[in-house]
């Protein structure tokens, strides 16, 4: 009897482990200008590490850009790729990669009332924290 119960327990435990749960990467900043203080990026991507790639010539990861600079939580393993704004408006996204989703989110947020300010601040921040280019060794010219 113990053997049967043990086998049943192992089977149910293994089955439960095979089901992927939604993972939420919370917004790192919130805004008090709307009833919902952050946006939500719903994505079909299930691996959070896909958002650990660095964003275009910066030392900022994709998830940090989305979550901090654009007040957005990321809901992994969703049924579709969609951005839900702070006012509840839903935008279906066509991108499939984490980098392309990040670009699409930034472009959409830039068209929003509060998003214009966030985008401007991000562009200023990104310019200051740009990685030196390997090809022209930008940033090393000041050492001469």
Image: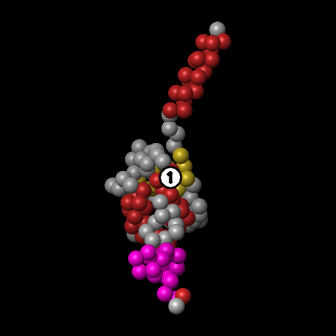
Task: Decide whether residue 134 is among the magenta residues.
Answer: yes
How many numbered dots are placed on residues in this image? 1
**Quadrant of residue 91 within the rendered picture:** bottom left
Residue that label 1 marks? 49
Q: Position of residue 140 (x, y in %)?
A: 50, 83
Indicate left or right for 12 with 112 as reference. Answer: right
Residue found at the very far top of the displayed protein: 1
* Nearest to the observer: residue 23 or residue 53: 53
Q: Position of residue 61 (x, y in %)?
A: 51, 63
Residue that appears at 57% across and 55% down:
26
Residue that appears at 53% across and 56% down:
73
Residue that appears at 46% across and 66% down:
55
The answer to whether residue 124 of the structure is visible from this angle is no
Task: Decide whether residue 115 is among the magenta residues.
Answer: no
Highlighted range, magenta? 123-142
Q: Quadrant of the N terminus?
A: top right
Residue found at the very far front of the displayed protein: 144
**Quadrant of residue 3 within the rendered picture:** top right
Residue that appears at 41% across and 80% down:
136
> Eyeballing the image, is 110 above or below 139?
above
* Nearest to the observer: residue 49 or residue 29: 49
């Amino acid at each position: 009897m113990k053997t049967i119960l043990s086998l049943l327990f192992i089977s149910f435990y293994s089955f439960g482990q095979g089901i992927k749960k939604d993972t939420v990467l919370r917004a790192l900043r919130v805004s008090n200008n709307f009833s919902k203080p952050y946006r939500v990026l719903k994505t079909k991507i299930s691996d959070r590490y896909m958002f650990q790639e660095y964003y275009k010539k910066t030392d900022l990861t994709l998830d940090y850009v989305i979550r901090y600079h654009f007040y957005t939580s990321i809901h992994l393993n969703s049924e579709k790729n969609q951005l839900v704004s702070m006012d509840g408006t839903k935008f279906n996204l066509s991108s499939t990669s984490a980098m392309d989703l990040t670009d699409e989110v930034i472009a959409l947020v830039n068209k929003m009332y509060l998003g214009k300010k966030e985008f401007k601040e991000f562009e200023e921040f990104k310019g200051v924290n740009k990685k030196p280019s390997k090809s022209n060794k930008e940033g090393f010219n000041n050492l001469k």
